[in-house]
Amino acid sequence: MYKCIIIDDEPHAIAGVKKYLESLPNIDLVAAYSDPYAALTEIETFKDIDLILMDIDMPNISGIELSKSIRPKTRKLIFTTGHTKYGYEAFKADADDYLLKPYTLGEFMIAINKALLKPTDQISNNSSTFLVKNKDDGNRIVAIKYSEVIAVESQLNYVSIHTTSTKVTTYMSLGEMVKVLSPATGFLQFHRSFIISYNFIDYIDGNTIKMKNGLFITVREYYKKSFADFINKNLIRSKNKIKTDTHK
């Protein structure tokens, strides 16, 4: 049994999550809080919490702020919110998933299973390939070479993996894809919704990056410093000044 806690300031939202949890017999709901401060205080008394389902937009203290204190207390954290604007903050808070209200029972079950099921296909550091389920092909498992990944694009509850030959859609967060791609080198992030491969950059025009598959990515404000550092590190410049002939 997995131990679960719900934190949401809306009682009807808590009731909805409880109803969904009834479809998952391996989940033990140990507490539900409509007051985030009460959750912050009482969560210290619980041991071995496997999952926290938490709203983001709550009064006085947001779920993002609360996560800074309670994230070490749980093995998995899934944010539930009615706003799309918190995707990047959720990623930075090390959330395992991000459910956008109103979400279906199917979406809920996929997120829970993805978070709690123990992976049996851990990637070897020496592997050149990883496996994912392709949502657009009946969840058939496909093999993707790291060297063929051009970009990964976040689509809230799933990602689109752009490769040299196709595009694969899979139920996974961009944060999880960061971990999947970690055995390989050359992957960069200058936008909260994209991971790109250095090897497939076509050209850079100001703050716009064009990839070789025609994908355009605009560098966002948060990433401008790291983008400038990337340019300064990799742009080849001549060390010799151009001499002009003044004697004609």
Image (tube, rainbow, N blue to C red):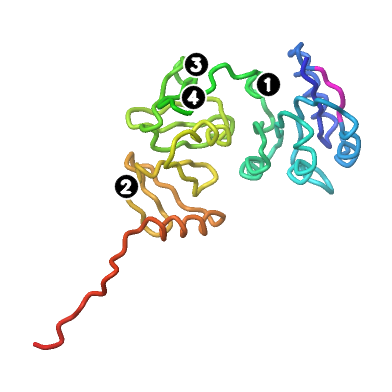
57 on left or right of 215:
right
User: What amino acid type should be assigned to the residue bearing mark 1?
Assistant: Leu
Q: Decide which of tag 3 and tag 4 comes sooner along the chain.
A: 4
- Name the residue beneath numbered marker 1: 116
Residue at the extreme left: 248
User: What amino acid type should be assigned to the residue bearing mark 3?
Assistant: Asn
- Percent position (x, y) of residue 161? 44, 31
Bin the neighbour count of mark 1 within 10 Å (Cα to Cα): few under 14, some 14-19, many 20 and up.
some
18 on left or right of 169:
right
- Name the residue beneath numbered marker 2: 202
**Answer yes or no: do the residues labelled 2 and 4 have beta carbons within 8 Å?**
no
Which one is closest to the eye, mark 4 or mark 1? 4
User: What amino acid type should be assigned to the residue bearing mark 4?
Assistant: Ser
User: What amino acid type should be assigned to the residue bearing mark 2?
Assistant: Asp
- Percent position (x, y) of residue 67? 76, 41
Label 3 sits on a secondary structure element that is loop
Q: Residue at x 48, y 53 (%)?
A: 219
**Answer yes or no: do the residues labelled 1 and 3 have beta carbons within 8 Å?**
no
Q: Which residue is drawn at 49% across and 49% down?
A: 190
Residue at the extreme top: 25
- Name the residue beneath numbered marker 3: 139
The numbered disc on residue 124 is 4
Closest to the observer, 192 or 42: 42
185 on left or right of 64:
left
**Answer yes or no: do the residues labelled 4 and 1 have beta carbons within 8 Å?**
no
Which one is closest to the eye, mark 2 or mark 4? 4
